[in-house]
Image: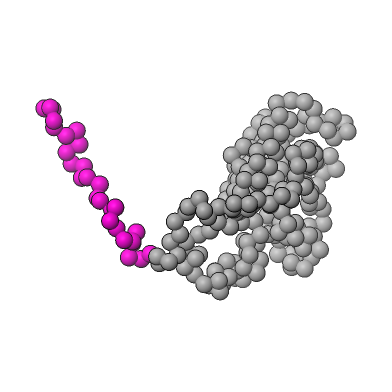
Amino acid sequence: MSKGESMSPNVSESPDISSAQSPSDNAVMEQMHKPIMANFASTFSDHKPRILLLYGSLRERSYSRLVIEESARLLEYFGAEAKIFDPRGLPQPDTEDESHPKVKELRELMMWSEGQIWCSPERHGSMTGIMKSMIDWVPLSLGGVRPTQGKTLAIMQVSGGSQSFNAVNQMRILGRWMRMLTIPNQSSVAKAFLEFEDDGRMKPSPYYNRIVDVVEELVKFTLLTRDNKDFLVGRYSERVESAEEVSKRVNQKSL
C-alpha cells in the first residue's frame, strides 16, 4: 500500500447530522426530552431510606431469612429503615384476589419502599417458588402507578452446596423486568449451614463481608437515585401515549 492510500477505501464517511432538525420524521418532538443537569433534584429527601426485605424460604431455620435479618441490622446501622415481609400465609398467585390480607400487606410495603433486598435459596438450580410467588403478586402497575419502577434492588442467594449464582442471575432479570435499578454488587453464600451460629447470627467470613458490601452499596444507590427515580426511568415511548392508553396496555386482564 502506497503512502497516503486509505486503509479502508470502501468505508464511507459518517454523514453530517449536525444540522439535522429532527432525529426522525417519526419523532414527536415535544416529547423528546434532552437530559440536562437541571432535570435532576437540587434538594434531597432527609428521611431514612425505606428498604423492604424479602426472603424465599419457610423453613424454621431459613438461611435466606437469617441473611435478610443480618441485612436488616446492617441497614439500620447505615441509617436506613428496614421492614421484612413474612411470606407465611401468602397464597399462590391467582388462587386469591388482591383483597387477601397478605397480598395487601405485600403491595403496601412495595409502595412504601424506596429500595429492596431479595434473598432466595437456590433450589433445583433456580430461585424458590416462594420467592417467585411474592414477585408475581406485585403487578407492573397499580392504578396507573408502577409499584417497583425506579426503586433500587440488591439481590442475594444462599446455597446448600458450592457457590452458585443461578438464583441471583434470575432475580437480576426479574428486577429489570420490574423496572428496578438493580445495583452491580450481589451476594452468594455457599454451604450456608456452616456460616451461622446456633443463635442465628452469621459468623465472620468473606461471605459476611460481601453482604456488608452489598447493603452499603444499596444504601448509597438509594440515596443517590430516590429523588430522581421518575426522571431516570421516564420513557419517550410512554410519553407519546395517553395515560389511558398506558393503563390499558399494562393492565391486560386476559394475560
Q: Is residue 18 magenta?
A: yes
Coordinates of residue 41 in the picture (x, y in percent): 59, 53
Quadrant of the image occupied by residue 13: top left
| Residue 240 can be seen, yes or no | yes
- Which residue, as the protein is rendered here, is positioned at the far right? 199
- State the residue at coordinates (76%, 42%): 79
On the image, the x and y values in percent for residue 193 come to 78, 31
> Looking at the image, can residue 189 be seen?
no
* Picture coordinates of residue 172, whole percent (x, y): 60, 45
Residue drawn at (57%, 66%) of the image: 250
Count the marks: 0
Image coords of residue 110 (percent x, y):
71, 56
- Segment tinted magenta in the rendering: 1-27
Query: Which quadrant of the figure has residue 197?
Result: top right
Q: Is residue 53 left or right of residue 17?
A: right
Residue 110 is a magenta residue: no
**Which quadrant would the C terminus be assigned to in this image?**
bottom right
